Image: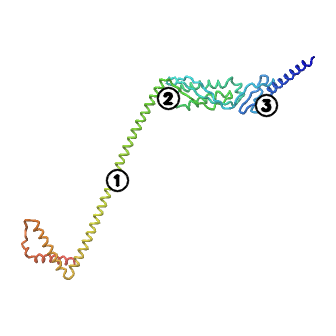
Amino acid sequence: MPQSNFSIILAFIIVGTLILVAITLWKTARVVPQKSAFIVERLGKYRKTLEAGFHILIPFIDVVEYKHTLKEQAIDVPPQACITKDNIAVEVDGILYLQVVDPVKASYGINNYQFASTQLAQTTMRSVIGKLDLDKTFEERDSINNAIVDAVDKASDPWGVKVTRYEVKNILPPKSIKDAMEKQMRAEREKRAMIAESEGEKQAKINRAQGDKQELIERSEGEKQKRINEADGKAQEILRIAAATARGLREIADAINQEGGMNAVNLRIAEGYLQEFGKLAKENNTMIVPTDLSDVSGVLAAIGSVLKDTKTIGQ
């Protein structure tokens, strides 16, 4: 055999051996990523579940048949037509969140757990929407989400899948219904605005009335206090005048009791008598003259007699 042919055959053998070794290593060594699980079958039968890390398999006997992520998955639920309790067709879509908790059940319990969960979520959504009126569908989002989660989670337990939550994204009524709802909302907003305005006017009137009432009360209290103060002032004035008059009378009485006091009183009375009589003559054209006007000494004597009697009674 020529040397060249032998070299070529040897090269083919070496290359084939390297390829066989590479295939064997590729079939034998497996690296499982974090939060993942691989299902291994041996000759078509479940052998074991590979968790995160490096693993060695028997080549051509052990085969990785299924690969699952253990992370939480968000699956879009396509829009679908639902009929409400009041016979209104609405289009509803959402997002389903689930997580594989048992890779073996997820592999052998159902063919495609994602598709099955989505279909179950849609059928449950139609059932829940059919029990609600159109207005309630917008208000009861939380109850719709909880009902779908409960139904799908219960059904997916044999599949090794845990449904964590469901969220309704959109509830789209027909255009005619949407226009009617917009008109209704506009009317409600106008109604609330009118009510708020009337409540504001009502409160303003109440505040003004209370202010006027308080003003009247304060004014009356001020007037009352003013009158009390005036009365107190007049009372103090009367008391002081009376006290001054009493002091004056006491001094007059003391003066009368002194020597020559009676003569001074008689003189003072005479002066007053003449002054008042003179004023009367100036202010009136007609005068009534007493018969004893010429006898001034008689008048003084009469007054002096009165003063003496008063003095005697005082003693």
Which residue is painted at 65% across and 27% down in the image? 156
Dot 1 or dot 3, earlier in sequence: 3
Marks 2 and 1, Cα distance to the nearest angstrom? 55 Å
Dot 2 or dot 1, earlier in sequence: 2
Estimate the x, y position of residue 303 in percent, counting from the top left.
Answer: 14, 75
Q: Nearer the viewer, residue 255 or 19?
A: 19
Marks 1 and 3, Cα distance to the nearest angstrom? 95 Å
Q: Nearer the viewer, residue 19 or 150?
A: 19
Q: Secondary structure at mark 2?
A: helix
The residue at which mark 3 appears reads as: 55
In this rendering, would 74 be left or right of 136?
right
Q: Nearer the viewer, residue 272 or 152?
A: 272
Q: Residue furthest right?
A: 1
Q: Residues within 10 Å of mark 3 (few under 14, many from 20)?
A: few
Which residue is painted at 22% across and 79% down in the image? 255
Which residue is painted at 46% across and 28% down in the image? 182
Q: Label 2 is placed on what type of residue?
A: Asp
Q: Label 1 is placed on what type of residue?
A: Glu
Dot 2 or dot 3, earlier in sequence: 3
Q: Quadrant of the C terminus?
A: bottom left
Q: Secondary structure at mark 3?
A: strand
Q: Residue furthest left?
A: 291
In this rendering, would 105 be left or right of 314?
right
The residue at which mark 2 appears reads as: 135
Number of residue marks: 3
Estimate the x, y position of residue 129 in percent, counting from the top left.
Answer: 54, 26
Q: Residues within 10 Å of mark 2 (few under 14, many from 20)?
A: few
Marks 2 and 3, Cα distance to the nearest angstrom? 57 Å
The residue at which mark 1 appears reads as: 218
